[in-house]
Amino acid sequence: MKLFETKFYQSMKSNVPLLDRITHYIVRRKGKQMRPMFVFLTAKLTGQFQERSYRAAALIELIHTATLVHDDVVDDSDMRRGFFSLNALWKNKIAVLVGDYLLSKTLILSTENEDFDLLKVVSVAIKEMSEGELLQIEKARKLDITEEVYFEIIRQKTATLIAACCEAGARSVGAEEEICKKMHRFGNLVGIAFQIKDDLFDYTSSDIIGKPVGIDIKEQKMTLPLIHVLNKVSKQEKDWLINSVKRHNQNKKRVREVIQFVKDNGGIEYTQKTMEQYTADALQILDEFPESEYKTSLRTMVNYVMEREK
Amino acid sequence: MKLFETKFYQSMKSNVPLLDRITHYIVRRKGKQMRPMFVFLTAKLTGQFQERSYRAAALIELIHTATLVHDDVVDDSDMRRGFFSLNALWKNKIAVLVGDYLLSKTLILSTENEDFDLLKVVSVAIKEMSEGELLQIEKARKLDITEEVYFEIIRQKTATLIAACCEAGARSVGAEEEICKKMHRFGNLVGIAFQIKDDLFDYTSSDIIGKPVGIDIKEQKMTLPLIHVLNKVSKQEKDWLINSVKRHNQNKKRVREVIQFVKDNGGIEYTQKTMEQYTADALQILDEFPESEYKTSLRTMVNYVMEREK
């Protein structure tokens, strides 16, 4: 990871001082680095680790960073990972341009090294992510969203990049087509579980971890706990829930009542079980590989996704 | 161009209804289509036109559209090409995502067809454009900007994409490396002339063509007419000019006075002459090719860049 971080920082360098100040700031606020770890571990699980695997990880981390930077514009969120968002600090226009710059760096890194197989994986991921976000904007605020649409949204906006990590890891070491596809499926399952966990936090998180509860409801974003409950309660209760999200989403007391109602009606339990099914399916794919320290680490990461507290 | 438009529209298709509504809107407000024309004409000038040339044009037009969409966020401009900007109509978040989607479509189109040489040209262009815009944000508002920095900014933010058009046109028909580089230089010269002309409009345009005068001054954007005049007038006049741009840039009367001062001190004349030098250099490159209808059309386009009224 140390070696990767140096290479990654190198890949962001530019000759515009403003850009270097910003990328320095981005590197400082780096998160869990889950994505490069998935690339490295799947590369090691499926073949002989090599220089290309670093580039695969850098590609995906650049894209992930670009989407985070663009997300700062998109969500107008004031806080991200505990720091002020780029948006708040440097304004929208710069955020958009820095995101574009990082995307172009990804491209150049690929074309210079002729990593076209990796680029293919990555470009499909970018397309699916932007489609997923747009689908969410279009659908998630419709209060009659189905579970099916919910899963399509989280697959596209979150799972697709983790799937790309795992597939790119395998491709970077020249694994067979079938293994690459298997790793894609593995990443997809882990990614969906990851997003379900994220959505659960909106109902179960405490203020301690920095992410307040009820933001999704406030933003009229329908996620699994609420979608599930909507489909099983009485007409009268459903009307109350929809009315709460539709008209009283800025009322803190009412949002707390909705959260409590979802808890009392098994929304959390159901969501937790669904997530566990996804991680179980992911672990089953790992079972097909012989035991190794990489397999153990991947298993640990899957369990981390499910059990993390933030 | 008809055939190209059909193919281009196809390449934007998605399975998200919101996206299709937006791309439909983008296609409707299409501009001069100068970029695809440069691709086609340079392709025909330097070799045998083929299917790949359409893809080269689609690649660049997708990127151009993506940057325009992102620019809507960047500039927070309310009008573009006479329509309301995407930003005003659909909000920032959607503009960013649609731009990303279009960029990813570009990538997928290239990787699917293994147009890696074209992709290389295009990714360098994206990087330079975002760097150019950031450089402009950082430098252009510094009131002591030099001509050198001005030319570096317009080369990166505008000329680079037109250079990419001409280079990609030549690459799409398998022209020799030297010819590809020559076409790149040609596009670069035309692009710089194009941006100089654009900057001139801020001093010479009338309300009839929809682009009001003095916007750059209002936004404290230093362009060639003003930069030139600043460097030749007395200390006292310079102080008055800088003070006008710095503190009185929202005062319409004062902005008009600055424009008049620039005119009276040869700023327009100098800028016009500089632009003409760039187009002359561009035409000289064309001279090296045998006469053909494509060469004539390219010459016409170069003259159009210089003589256009909007």
Image (cartoon, coloured by chain):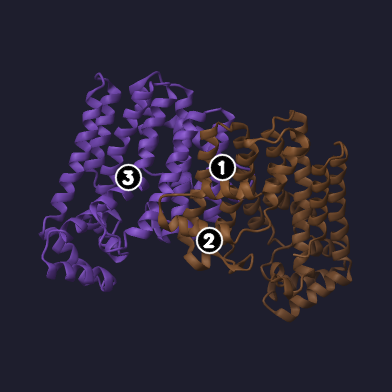
Chain colours: A brown, B purple
Residue shown at 47%/51% (left/top)?
B69
The local secondary structure at tag 1 comes to: helix
User: Where, by quadrant of the figure, is residue A283 drawn?
Assistant: top right
Relative height, residue A119 to residue B88 (above, below): above
Decide which of A11, B121 is in the foreground and name it.
Answer: A11
The local secondary structure at tag 3 comes to: helix
Residue occupied by mark 1: B104
Q: Distance between the residues labelled 2 and 1?
A: 26 Å
Q: Do the residues labelled 2 and 1 touch (CB within 8 Å)?
A: no
Q: Distance between the residues labelled 1 and 3?
A: 25 Å
Q: Can residue A32 be seen in this view?
A: yes
Closer mark to the observer between disc 2 and disc 3: 2
Please report, as a chain letter, where disc 3 is located.
B
Percent across and percent down for residue B141 are 32, 62
Label located before the other in sequence (1 or 3): 1
Which corner quadrant holds the C terminus of chain A? bottom right
Please rate how many residues cluster around mark 2, counting C-alpha atoms within 10 Å: few if below 14, some from 14 to 19, many from 20: few
Residue type for callout 1: Ser
Residue occupied by mark 3: B155
Residue shown at 87%/67% (left/top)?
A233
Residue shown at 74%/56% (left/top)?
A195
Residue type for callout 3: Arg
Q: Do the residues labelled 2 and 3 touch (CB within 8 Å)?
A: no
Please rate how many residues cluster around mark 1, counting C-alpha atoms within 10 Å: few if below 14, some from 14 to 19, many from 20: many
Please report, as a chain letter, where disc 1 is located.
B
Please report, as a chain letter, where disc 2 is located.
A
What residue occupies the far front of the structure in this picture?
Answer: A2
Residue occupied by mark 2: A25
